[in-house]
Amino acid sequence: MQWGSFYALIALGYTLVYGVLLLINFAHGDIFMVGAYIGFFIATLLLGHYTAALPFALSPTAIFVLSLILTMILTAGVGVAIERVAYRPLRRKGVSRLYVVITALMCGLILENGNLALLGASRRSFPELLPKAVYTVGGVVISNIKILVIVTTILVFLLLETIVRKTKIGMAMRAISYDRMAVPLMGIPVDTVIVFTFILGSSMAALAGVLFATAYPVLEPYMGALVGWKAFIAAVLGGIGEIRGAFLGGFLLGFIEIFVAAYFPSTLRDLIAFSILLMFLTVKPTGIFGVARATKI
Amino acid sequence: MRSLSILAYVLLGILLVAGAMGNWVNSYIQLVIMYIGINIILSSSLNLVNGYMGEFSVGHAGFMAVGAYITSVLNVWFFTDSTIFGPSLFPPVSAVVLFPVTLLIGGIGAALAGLLVAIPSFRTRGDYLAIITLAVNYIVKSSIENLQVIGGARGFMGMGGVVNAMKSAVPVPWVLIWVLIATGLTIWVLYRFVNSTYGKGIVAIRDDEIAAEIMSVDTRRMKMVAFMLSSGLAGIAGGLFAHVLGYINPGTFTIMKSTEVLVMVYLGGMGSLSGSVLSAVILTVGLELFRSFQVWKWVVVPLLLILLMLFRPEGLFGHRELTDVFPWLGRRFAKKERQV
């Protein structure tokens, strides 16, 4: 359930960007990593691990909430910066989508290796901010962090669903995805909507990053890569560009992995997860909720 | 005219081999030349799918891994006394004759793995296909990791014995020779293929798949041929790579390696063989020069590519060959770029 939640959270970010821009934001997994790192630095700063200690002491829970919010804001800034520097000029030029995808891939690599080069390969451990509590409900052992992760994912899902379906900006997002050419003619500020999408997507990634770091308190520069790919697979599994699909796909992938890990040696986990994806895409190429796009003539 | 460039390439190859034998070219430069050759095979074969056919394949390293493992396992099994497979099946001297056969078998194996990508590609295109290729890359990597017989995650070695066996039979730098031959053949095959009437179907698929279908291009067949050719060549490159290094492990063939090849393809330009060759040379030499910077090179390379995308999105030679850029070259040499 917990893994599924992480996949779902990150997949939501993927799907959001894809839904609006039709762009696979390959840098998303690395934004997740950046989020975890920013969270780490903010949390340690607030805990007073550096010389600049706060004049007043905060309770660990307050620090957690505060660093969560700050991380989301900062990471959203990173996401928007990438959009501004790399994607927007390309979009303005009207080049093929493929080039934007490659740019995204490269942005991801820069984030990953830039982190490696700047901070070194040493792992960092995230400070334990939330007191661990374990409940047993009907024979199932579940920790408070797990509950937090799952509840957050569901809340985020509901929030995104409402934003996209009910609000004006959500309507604009759907409109851009439907026809990018006609939208500016209707007086919709395309760039603003796209930036908003990136803010949402990146802060989702940051949220996932901080939660992930809380659950598995080891940070390393490449942590985003595999989780990011898996989340991407989850998004595809559900039908990319569809929020419900990402949510479902994330949990589905989480379940599959847990089951595989339970019955087979754990080294086979990736193998089986990817094989399932391959078979699934061969049978139903557009995912669970995906709709085949109109073919061009 | 064309025979002239082939002749030039053969001459260059002979010169290099002679240089290697006479110790004029030291072993480090030889190594770099072999890397260049392998990278040329990889980037030009990926360009067939990504550039000429307009698909987006991101898992080239997976096919390379298949070829590398099949070739090395066969070679070690056949020609050397190893702890895993026991005594050699054939006399070690026969490696000289049979090495291209095993290399080809590796290529065929990789081509069959390419079917894994080709079949789903009939129904999906673009973004989804990227995932499929990615998934195939992961599947290959983690299958190899789980095969304990060939070393699993620890890797596989013993290819050095094969190379030594060949060397003891006829003392010439065999691996260098095979790399040169394979590189030349790859460029030749790809050049002939994309310029043939049959191969034009691939470009037709890129430009408009449905129109191509209507114009009686068998798109399924074309895609299968293109994917299998591309992955087969990658497999051969993998086999050579394994013998250059003498040791392989699944960790080599990750997305990182695939990305490296992607960078070469897009730096050189889509749908341009000369671009692929040129960028493979530039990138390989460049990375060797900046080896001391280690991690930073993987920050700089993507950054360069992003800048390239911003200012010249079609790459150095987008959809053009060297002869289109410099017409006098065409008159003089016809594809001079084939010289490595």
Image (cartoon, coloured by chain):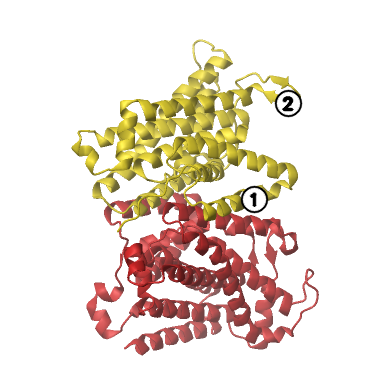
Chain colours: A yellow, B red
Circle 1 — which element?
Answer: helix
Q: How many marks?
A: 2
Badge 2 element: strand
| Residue B123 point in image, percent of width and height | 46, 58
The chain letter for the residue carrying disc 1 is A
Res A184 → quadrant = top left
Q: Is residue B263 above or below residue A10?
A: below
**Amino acid type of the residue tagged 1 in the rendering:** Ile
Q: B304 or B90, which is in the foreground?
A: B90
Name the image quarter holding residue A3.
top right
Relative to A223, is B318 on the left or the right? left
Quadrant of the image containing the N terminus of chain B: bottom left
Residue at the farthest top position: A56
Q: Which residue is mark 1?
A: A272
Q: Amino acid at mark 2?
A: Val
**Residue lying at 74% horizontally and 22% vertically, measured from the top left:** A138
Give the mark nearer the N terminus: 1 vs 2.
2
| Mark 2 residue crowding within 10 angstroms, few (<14) / some (14–19) / many (20+) | few
Q: Position of residue B185 (x, y in %)?
A: 47, 80
Would you say the residues marked 1 and 2 are in contact, meaning their CB atoms lie under 8 Å apart? no
- Percent across and percent down for residue B115 are 54, 66
Residue B217 lies, with reference to residue B126, above or below; the image says below
Kindly identify the residue that appears in the image at 34 percent across and 36 percent down. Answer: A174
Quadrant occupied by the C terminus of chain B: bottom left
Q: Which residue is mark 2?
A: A140
The circle on residue A47 is none
Q: CA distance from mark 1 to mark 2?
A: 26 Å
Residue B104: percent from left, percent from top: 58, 78
